[in-house]
Image (tube, rainbow, N blue to C red):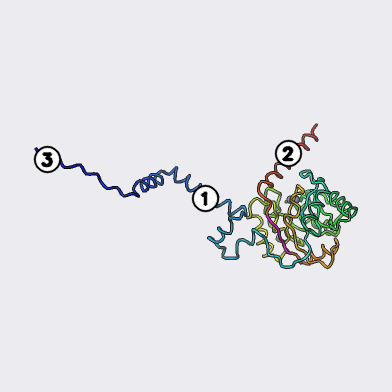
């Protein structure tokens, strides 16, 4: 009878259990996909949301054209001057409940020199806010304006006192604006969810909003900036605030000769502008959107009954 060989325990390297674990993990496609998503989601969120993590992302993948952070903390101020938020909604818009006094109070607290009230398809809010600012004598210049819903999307018209019929073509809307002496700005052109007009090439406009602080993702602002640069259109910024707290979140630095409506509008038309500001925090964008939807539904029910 042969002797039984002594029992030997194979030596397993310490890393073996870990190696087995990763082998199992990646051979199993489901876990691999979950793991990759887990890695990618925060990365993509950082990339598109403009969070503070973004400089890390832009450091890893620098754009060949320009530093990516320019789109996030926008735009370098070239002509330091007066600060104007050129896109503010008041309670005269169906999807906003911003009180005029609250808007003016926040504007002053944020150090704005003025703002443009651009309610949806009505100049009433702008005219009322301009009157209220004069009554209060708080040194905030209010430019009356309107955000006209053209057949292709929204168009801001500043400095007019009469309404323009909605749903006309962009060309006809702008033609009417010119007759009334308005200054024309294309807001959030590439933000589909807010009725952006798309490409503004060929339109007779004075400026393009290249930073709308209500954009959830940065791509729409980036695209607007690139198109404005390509066409040589002056770039401006606005908060598009539908609640008073967000007034002045984005603003335009305007190199005007004096703080009057006429001088400021002339400076915009001459391109003496630089966009500045920050993105509206995502939870507030979602809150504003939810509020807008609620108010729209209420208005519809009210109209039906
Ligand atoms: Zn809009
Ligand atoms: Zn708006």
Label 2 to label 3: alpha-carbon separation: 87 Å
> Mark 3 vs ligand 1: CB under 8 Å?
no
Q: Position of residue 49 (x, y in %)?
A: 62, 52
Q: Position of residue 34 (x, y in %)?
A: 48, 44
Asked whether, in this view, residue 45 is left or right of residue 195, the answer is left
Numbered tag placed on residue 95 in the rendering:
none
Q: Nearer the viewer, residue 191 or 252?
A: 252
Numbered tag placed on residue 294 in the rendering:
2
Magenta residue span:
274-278
Residue designated by label 1: 40
Label 1 to label 2: alpha-carbon separation: 33 Å
Q: Please, what secondary structure does the residue beneath circle 2 have?
A: helix
Whether residue 30 is in magenta: the answer is no
Residue designated by label 3: 3
- Kindly give the residue lying farthest to the top in the view shown: 305
Q: Main secondary structure of the magenta part?
A: strand
């Amino acid at each position: 009878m042969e002797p039984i060989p002594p029992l030997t325990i194979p030596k397993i390297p310490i890393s073996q259990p870990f190696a087995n674990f990763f082998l199992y993990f990646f051979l199993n496609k489901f876990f691999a996909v979950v793991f990759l998503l887990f890695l990618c989601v925060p990365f993509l969120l950082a990339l598109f949301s403009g969070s503070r993590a973004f400089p890390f992302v832009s450091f890893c993948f620098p754009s060949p054209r320009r530093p990516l952070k320019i789109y996030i903390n926008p735009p370098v101020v070239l002509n330091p001057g007066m600060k104007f938020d050129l896109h503010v909604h008041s309670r005269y818009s169906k999807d906003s409940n911003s009180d005029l006094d609250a808007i003016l109070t926040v504007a002053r607290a944020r150090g704005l020199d003025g703002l443009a009230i651009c309610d949806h398809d009505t100049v009433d809010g702008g005219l009322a806010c301009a009157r209220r600012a004069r009554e209060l004598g708080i040194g905030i210049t209010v430019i009356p304006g309107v955000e006209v819903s053209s057949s292709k999307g929204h168009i801001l018209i500043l400095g007019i006192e009469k309404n323009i019929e909605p749903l006309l073509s962009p060309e006809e809307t702008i033609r009417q604006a010119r007759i009334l002496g308005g200054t024309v700005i294309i807001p959030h052109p590439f933000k589909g969810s807010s009725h952006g007009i798309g490409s503004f090439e060929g339109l007779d406009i004075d400026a393009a909003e290249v930073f709308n602080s209500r954009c959830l993702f940065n791509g729409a602002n980036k695209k607007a900036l690139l198109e404005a640069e390509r066409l040589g259109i002056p770039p401006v910024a606005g908060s598009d605030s539908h609640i008073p707290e967000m007034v002045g979140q984005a603003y335009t630095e305007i190199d005007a000769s004096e703080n009057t409506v006429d001088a400021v509008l002339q400076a915009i038309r001459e391109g003496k502008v630089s966009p500045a500001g920050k993105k509206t925090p995502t939870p507030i964008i979602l809150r504003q959107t939810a509020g807008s939807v609620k108010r729209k539904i209420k208005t519809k029910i009210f109209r039906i009954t």
